[in-house]
Amino acid sequence: MDSWIVYTGLTVVYIIILIIYFFRRSRSHERELHQFLQVAEDQLKHRQAEINQDAKQKISKAYSLVKQVHDIAAAFEKQAQTEYDQIVEDAKVERQELIAKTKTDIADLFKQADREIAEYKAARFKEVERNLVKLVMAVTQKALGKSLSTSDHRQLILSALDEVIQKQSQSQ
Amino acid sequence: MPVSPSKLAHQFFASLYTTADVKAVSDQLEALSQNQTFKVHAHRIVTDSQLTDNQKGTQLLYLLRQIDQPLLYDFFSDLISAHHIWLFHHDKIDYFDKFVQAFQQVIDTCPVFYLTTATPLHPSDYPALIQKIKTGLGLRVLLQTNVNPALIGGVQVKLENYLYDVSIRSKLNQFQAQWLKTLDESDSLVGHHDPG
């Protein structure tokens, strides 16, 4: 009985020693793993920090770019708005000027038309007057031509000759 | 020869008033002057001692019957009646030629008075007109008459380089021009009346 007990005791001791050994070995591995994980975690954190930094920079650049684009767009929009307002303002002024000019032109045209009508009327009236004079003279000529007797003609010829003689005498 | 051919030419010219008459007479005289048959015949008549002056005159008149210008025929007839038959002698001096030449000279130096009237002039008016011109201008002229009814009355005269229009038409035209001028002047002074 003693042997088996010894053996058993030895086995138990041996098992205990094994347990202690594996326990210590496990602890050692656990520390190494922990240490490895710690290193990995540090590296990961470091990498994450670098990425974060890089991302921050990119975001910052992107943001800056977006801001610039936004500013440009805003400036462009503002300029466009200003130009649009200016164009609208100019158009309003031009429209007013155009309306004023058109009114002036229409007034001038009416004045010119009135003047031309007056001139036309005056010219036509003058022409009528002149035609009237010519008509009166034509009628006078016809009437005189028919009313002069032979004796009148003879007297007119003698009077005309007197006039010619007088003119000829003056010219010599 | 109591008178010279030149004086006869002037006498004859005094009875002519128009260029038409003068031209007709001149042509006739020129033809007679160049007609030797006529001249020889006339010379024979005036130198025929067997003929009396009356017979010579009768024969000369018979010879001159070829003249178709009454004025010229009457002139020669009067001349022969006054016994001036010496004109047809041409022994030493050709008196007829002298007469024709003198006549040509007279008409060449005589100014032409171009007279345009509204109605035809009667030939009986010519002497008075010629005398009037002679008295007024001191010129013996020949009349060249034309008729232009458009003159209405009065005359148009052309003498040498002068042209006178003292016709009724001219006076009416002047009156019309003056009337129109007055209208223009009144227009420019007071503006044209607008009848509405």
Image: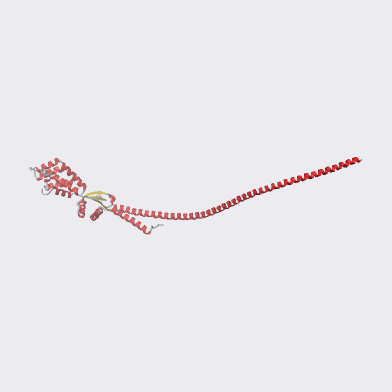
- Report whether residue A57 is seen: yes
**Residue B187 placement: quadrant:** bottom left
Report whether B17 appears left or right of A73: left
Judging from the image, the colouring scheme is secondary structure
Measuring from the top left, give residue B193's x and y in whole percent: 39, 58
* Viewer-closest of B191 and B147: B191
Residue at the far left: name it.
B50
Measuring from the top left, give residue B188's x and y in whole percent: 36, 57
- Report whether residue A146 is seen: no
Report whether B177 appears left or right of B56: right
**Quadrant of the snapshot with the C terminus of chain B:** bottom left
Report whether B58 appears left or right of A111: left
* Viewer-closest of B95 and B41: B95
* Viewer-closest of A26 and B149: A26
* Viewer-closest of B6 and A135: B6
Measuring from the top left, give residue B123's x and y in whole percent: 21, 50
Count the marks: how many? Answer: 0
Residue name at image x 70 percent, y 47 percent: A46
Residue name at image x 21 percent, y 47 percent: B19
Residue at the far right: name it.
A1
Report whether A88 appears left or right of B139: right
Residue at the far bottom: name it.
B190
Measuring from the top left, give residue B163's x and y in whole percent: 26, 51
